[in-house]
Image (spheres, rainbow, N blue to C red):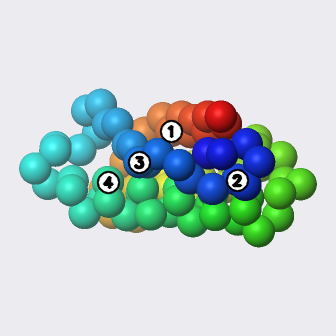
Amino acid sequence: IDKNTKEIISQTDCQTRGFVYLKDSAHVIKHVIELCEQAVGKLKDHPDTDVQEIRNAMRDASMRYITKETGKKPVFIGVIIEV
């Protein structure tokens, strides 16, 4: 994200390892990316928010969705890079 404007300046990416099959998980991954982008969007509206709070929001929303869709609880590592 841009350090000054708090806008996403690069494509959001989601990597998975072993908890879903790539062929079957396209809709899950797409929705997780949307959830993470929504969480980062809140940073733009509230620039004083700590980046760690945004990472936590990304993890919480994504884990709820992944658990609901797949019944699995994978490790979630949210990375936000400010440039």
Cα separation, mark 1 vs mark 4, equals 12 Å
Q: Secondary structure at mark 3?
A: loop
Mark 4 or mark 2, which is nearer the start of the sequence? 2
Mark 3 or mark 2, which is nearer the start of the sequence? 2
Provide the residue designation for mark 2. 6
Amino acid tagged 2: Lys
Q: Quarter-wise, where is residue 81 in the image?
A: top right
Mark 3 or mark 4, which is nearer the start of the sequence? 3
Decide: is 34 above or below 75: below
Mark 1 or mark 3, which is nearer the start of the sequence? 3
Say which mark, if any, is on residue 29.
Answer: 4
Residue placed most toward the observer, 28 or 71: 28
Q: Quadrant of the C terminus?
A: top right
Q: Quarter-wise, where is residue 52 in the image?
A: top right
**Residue 31, position as x, y percentages in the image:** 37, 64
Q: Quadrant of the N terminus?
A: top right
Amino acid tagged 4: Ile
Q: Nearer the viewer, mark 4 or mark 3?
A: 3
Residue at (50%, 38%) from the top-left corner? Answer: 76
Cα separation, mark 1 vs mark 2, equals 22 Å
Residue at (57%, 65%) from the top-left corner? Answer: 38
CB atoms of marks 2 and 3 within 8 Å = no
Provide the residue designation for mark 3. 11
CB atoms of marks 4 and 3 within 8 Å = no
Say which mark, if any, is on residue 76.
Answer: 1
Q: Secondary structure at mark 4?
A: helix
Q: Give left or right: position of 52 versus 75.
A: right
Cα separation, mark 4 vs mark 3, equals 14 Å
